[in-house]
Every structure is written in C-alpha cells, then in structure tokens.
Image (cartoon, helix red, strand yellow):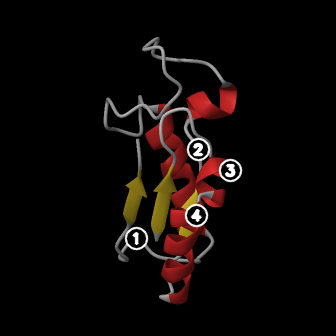
C-alpha cells in the first residue's frame, strides 16, 4: 500500500492531478500496489488547527491517538485490512512534497 501526501496548502485533488504524482501512481498500480490519496485535516476543514499560519499535515506528535492526521490515515488503512483487501503483513509506503 502506498499513501501519497499533498504539500503545504495542497489537497487530495492537487495531488491526484499533479503530473509527477500521476506518473508515480500509474506505475505503482501497474506494479500491483494499492494507492491512497487523502488530505490533511487542516486542508479538509480549512482551519489552521495548530496556529502555525499554514494549512498542512500535522507531523507531531507522531501517533494515531492525539494526531488527527495519523488517526485518519490509520482509519483508512484499517478499513482496507478489515475488508480483507490487504493485510498488515504487507509493507506500507508514503511519499509527499512540501
């Protein structure tokens, strides 16, 4: 499974339509990877939750209990596991840009 992450001020749509990322996810799909394109909670809500003046992913704390972005990614991946689409034994990767 491969998760593609947008940059600061970006969105899932901007990532899915980005030329370089299109080339990447086409190759990943051809190589039998599952691809997830999602967006930061701040991008979805339009609210700068941590007050740093930028709409982007929250990278700290790096856990799925107190960090909404990590929690959202975990919920998405757990859905794939629970539906039997993939298993926890398979490697997971991610890529993003600033």
Q: Quadrant of the C terminus?
A: top left
Q: Which residue is drawn at 55% across and 18% down?
A: 48
Q: Earlier in the sequence, mark 4 or mark 3?
A: 3
Marks 3 and 1 sit apart, C-alpha to C-alpha, by 27 Å
Where is mark 2, residue-wise?
39
Name the secondary structure under disc 4.
helix
Where is mark 1, residue-wise?
88
Marks 2 and 3 sit apart, C-alpha to C-alpha, by 9 Å
Name the secondary structure under disc 2.
loop
Residue 13 marker: 3
Of tags 4 and 3, which is closer to the observer? 4
| Picture coordinates of residue 49, whole percent (x, y) | 52, 17
Marks 4 and 3 sit apart, C-alpha to C-alpha, by 12 Å
Name the secondary structure under disc 3.
helix
Of tags 1 and 2, which is closer to the observer? 2
Where is mark 4, residue-wise?
19
User: In which quarter of the view is residue 34 placed?
Assistant: bottom right
* Of residues 24 and 88, the one drawn nearer to the viewer in this rendering: 24
């Amino acid at each position: 499974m491969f998760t593609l992450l947008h940059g600061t001020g970006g969105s899932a749509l901007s990532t899915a339509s980005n030329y370089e990322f299109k080339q990447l996810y086409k190759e990943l799909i051809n190589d039998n990877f599952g691809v997830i394109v999602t967006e930061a909670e701040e991008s979805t809500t339009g609210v700068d939750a941590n007050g740093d003046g930028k709409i982007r992913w929250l990278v700290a704390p790096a856990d799925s209990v107190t960090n909404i972005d990590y929690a959202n990614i975990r919920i998405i991946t757990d859905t794939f596991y629970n539906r039997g689409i993939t298993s926890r034994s398979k490697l997971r990767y991610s890529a993003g840009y600033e």
